[in-house]
Image (cartoon, grey):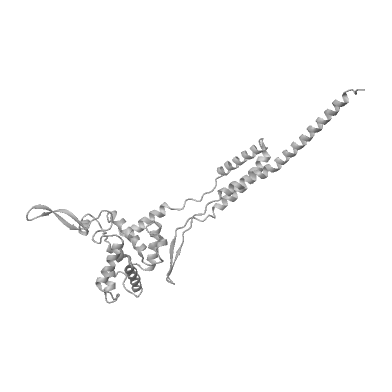
């Protein structure tokens, strides 16, 4: 794989010096303005890339495609029909394929893009899971970049070759945007807030041991709704999920990889604790009053028992 890396780096550097970006990679490294490499070495590099991707350079990219197809051809002179092998490109063109890609097209067409386009392509390919943004470096045309192009060319071929691999990327990207479109911001409706308040009011009544008075219920409802309103306001500040991406600065030529982040989640557990706290604060003084009343009731009972004992003693005659 060392040859691949050296070829990619040298090719990129040559492009920055004004070489036409549509130049064929082999012409570039063997031509007058290209690198000083033997044509045989250039072919070895291309062959190594093909081998590294596990591809047959004679076969179109995709599932089940062959290098040659056998079709029945009629001889006009002899008037007989016999099977004949036809090259894949000719056969697929006759079948309505507008775009046909072979393994050598991966590096040939992939190398034609400038750094700004490469950054955009990498971000789009990463968003549809064709490449891993963490396995590629900036705007370099590395193995991960070419792997994405390979998959796009396969996608085009597997769909009848009716669109270019770049059109395929746009189609996949637009579909992903539709599927991953941000949902409407969630808010608590009036009915939902009322239902939650009723739940905690029922909890307060259970703790109190009797129905709440209208004033108690109104007070508790105001306290609960205040907490729910605060929670609803916090939902609008949550950060949505973001995918890793590459940002390319044209002015400096620097590319920076921005890591992805998970979406911030609402603190539902914290809301539950706050609503429970409102009930506890409401019930606490009433529980204390009940405890004091129980103590006073116990004292009164003991006092009455003592007085009854004294009265009984007084009513008895004294033995003389």
Near-viewer residue (293 or 182): 293
- Farthest residue, direction front: 320
- Farthest residue, direction right: 320
Compared with 206, 154 (above or below) is: below
Tell me residue 92's x, y (percent): 22, 56
Tell me residue 206's x, y (percent): 64, 37
Tell me residue 58's x, y (percent): 23, 61
At horizontal 70% and vertical 40% (from top left) the residue drawn is: 287
Asked if one can make out residue 162 in the rendered structure from this viewpoint, the answer is: no
Q: Is residue 127 left or right of residue 163?
A: right
Compared with 188, 294 (above or below) is: above
Q: Can you say which quadrant of the picture contains the C terminus?
A: top right
Near-viewer residue (207 or 225): 207
Tell me residue 3's x, y (percent): 32, 69
Q: Splitting the image into 4 quarters, where does residue 10 fall?
A: bottom left
Q: How many marks?
A: 0
Q: Can you say which quadrant of the picture contains the N terminus?
A: bottom left
Q: Is residue 279 left or right of residue 49?
A: right
């Amino acid at each position: 794989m060392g040859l691949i890396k050296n070829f990619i780096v040298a090719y990129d550097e040559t492009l920055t010096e004004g070489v036409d970006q549509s130049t064929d990679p082999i012409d570039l490294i063997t031509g007058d303005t290209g690198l000083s490499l033997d044509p045989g070495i250039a072919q070895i590099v291309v062959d190594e890339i093909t081998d590294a991707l596990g591809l047959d350079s004679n076969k179109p990219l995709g599932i089940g495609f062959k290098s040659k197809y056998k079709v029945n051809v009629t001889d006009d002179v002899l008037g007989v029909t016999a099977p004949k092998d036809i090259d894949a490109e000719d056969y697929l063109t006759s079948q309505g394929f507008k775009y046909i890609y072979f393994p050598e097209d991966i590096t040939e067409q992939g190398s034609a893009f400038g750094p700004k386009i490469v950054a955009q392509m990498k971000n789009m390919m990463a968003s549809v899971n064709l490449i891993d943004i963490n396995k590629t470096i900036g705007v370099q045309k590395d193995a991960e970049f070419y792997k994405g192009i390979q998959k796009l060319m396969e996608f085009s071929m597997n769909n009848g070759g009716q669109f270019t691999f770049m059109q395929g990327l746009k189609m996949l990207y637009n579909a992903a945007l539709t599927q991953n479109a941000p949902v409407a911001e969630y808010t608590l409706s009036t009915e939902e807030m009322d239902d939650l308040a009723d739940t905690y009011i029922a909890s307060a009544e259970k703790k109190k041991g009797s129905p709440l008075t209208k004033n108690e219920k109104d007070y508790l409802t105001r306290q609960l709704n205040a907490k729910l309103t605060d929670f609803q306001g916090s939902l609008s500040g949550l950060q949505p999920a973001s995918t890793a991406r590459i940002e390319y600065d044209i002015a400096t030529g620097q590319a920076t990889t921005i890591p992805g982040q998970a979406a911030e989640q609402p603190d539902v557990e914290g809301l539950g604790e706050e609503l429970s706290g409102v009930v506890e604060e409401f019930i606490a003084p009433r529980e204390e009053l009940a405890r004091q009343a129980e103590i006073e009731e116990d004292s009164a009972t003991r006092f009455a028992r003592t007085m009854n004992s004294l009265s009984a003693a007084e009513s008895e005659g004294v033995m003389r």
